[in-house]
Image: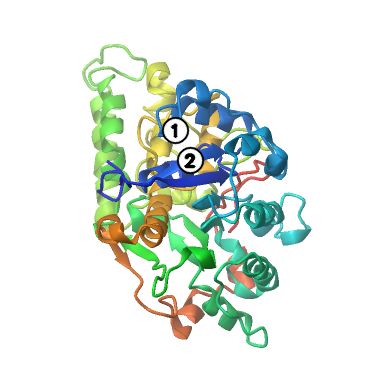
Amino acid sequence: MPASGHERPQFAQPLTSIEICAGAGGQAVGLHNAGFDHLALVEWDHHAVSTLRANVGDWPGWTPEKAQKIEPMDVRDFLGSKVLKDLDLNPGDLDLLAGGVPCPPFSLAGKRLGRDDERDLFPAALEIIDRLKPRAVMIENVRGILEPPEFFIDYRNYILDSLRESGYVIPDIDLTQSAKAQDIAMRKIWRRLDAKDFGVPQLRPRAILVAFHKDALKEGQEFRWPLRLKAEEATVFERLEPTMRERCEDFWDKNQRGEPAEPGERTGRDVYHEWREAAEKAAALGRGVAPTLVGGSRKHGGADLGPTRAKRAWAAMHVNAMGLANDRENCDPERDLFRDAGPMLTVEQTAIIQGFPRGWDFQGRKTARYRQVGNAFPPPVAEAVGRAIAAVLRPDHRDELLANYELDSSAAGGVTEDEAQQMEFSMSGTLGASPASEDRSGDFVGAGL
């Protein structure tokens, strides 16, 4: 069952979507769970494409044979592709165009070059939107595009102006006002959401842009942001306990060499209970949510669970964050489980922390699979926003779609000017922050906003 606690909604007339910069499918999983049927998935990284091929063959409108035909594609080539031509879409036919455009242009690790960065794919996304005129648009990025507001406010206005010219309902922005005031006005359609509020045991703030075409909105209809699940905050202990127990049970009465333990030797049972005690204690102290996972890039060595501050947070949960464990079936107990600082996590466990369903089959070697996980948009957050979008496009299903969420009810986007002041980051504060960015382009280690 999806993280919302609901079964996947079924509509008499299916909702359709195309996803660009799809990565390994985090956003796609969430939108699938929200009731959207994907017509196409566009991604250029060959490892991520292999992961999509391995997982979407049983989705509505797909077969294993069709999934195998997904090929790496630059989003800038999509409008001229056979994939789009074969869909035979007229403007306005598509319900949702979604994507997570590359984040380095707006992250500290990517040097925040914005529109001057050759990896900036917002222009390509806007061109696709203008051509297809989908009824709704959902674009995800790092929070660095929003915070501090003065950094990219002009570029954000350019993006919103382009959407307005394409027929999308965009709030009026007074360019004579401060960047903070403009940012507040934009929050009706462009705001920060935190993954921990949606059943993901991880500190992962994301910037989400949602816009509707004027022809898709009936009088009185309004998009309402989901604020959080009506549920207790998920913790690392709660989500990882089943898999951590499974891994340790393989060595329950064995030592670090995988041999029957002699009296006094540390066993897999000991490893499990040491981890459990620390993880439960961290959760009880309000520290049971993981730091942001860092996907890294092909330009930088192996993978670990983040910078120094993140490693300290993991250490409090008795997890060794210096690397990744081998998969359970290939476990080296001394390396993967029996370390004094605690067990390392497997790629599967990091995917659970990211909110992926347990059966999602990542392709590639260990480091390539972890990069896909660390660079993904958490599916439960995408599902929450997707359900809110579906509630506008299928208003008869609104109550069913959103029953498990607390919703924003204020006309100003739920943020007062005082709250906005508290959320602002000075440049010195921003440069000292450690949460990692999602980098779907794979060009930089995510170490900024």
Q: Nearer the viewer, residue 8 or 43?
A: 8
125 over 38 or under it: above or below = below
Mark 2 or mark 1: whose residue is earlier in sequence: 2
Instruction: Determine whether, in the image, residue 61 is placed left or right of residue 121.
Output: left
**Which circle marks residue 274 in the picture?**
none
Q: Secondary structure at mark 2?
A: strand
Where residue 81 sits in the image (x, y, percent)? 69, 36
Q: Measure how far apart labels 2 and 1 are at the Cα level.
A: 8 Å
Quadrant the C terminus occupies = bottom right
User: What residue does disc 1 label?
Assistant: 61
Q: Badges 2 and 1: C-beta atoms under 8 Å apart?
A: yes
Q: Nearer the viewer, residue 291 or 58?
A: 58
Instruction: Determine whether, in the image, residue 253 is placed left or right of residue 134.
Output: left
Where residue 296 sits in the image (x, y, percent)? 60, 41
Q: Nearer the viewer, residue 182 or 130?
A: 130
Displayed quadrant of residue 179:
bottom right
User: What residue does disc 2 label?
Assistant: 38
Amino acid type at circle 2 is His
Q: How many marks?
A: 2
195 over 335 or under it: above or below = below
317 over 303 or under it: above or below = below
Q: Is residue 346 visible?
A: no
Q: Residue furthest top?
A: 259
Instruction: Determine whether, in the image, residue 84 is placed left or right of residue 282.
Output: right
21 over 103 or under it: above or below = above
Q: Secondary structure at mark 1?
A: loop
Amino acid type at circle 1 is Gly
Q: How is the protein colored in the picture?
A: rainbow
Badge 1 crowding class, 10 Å Cα cut-off, few under 14, some 14 to 19, many 20 or more, is few
Q: Is residue 244 visible?
A: yes
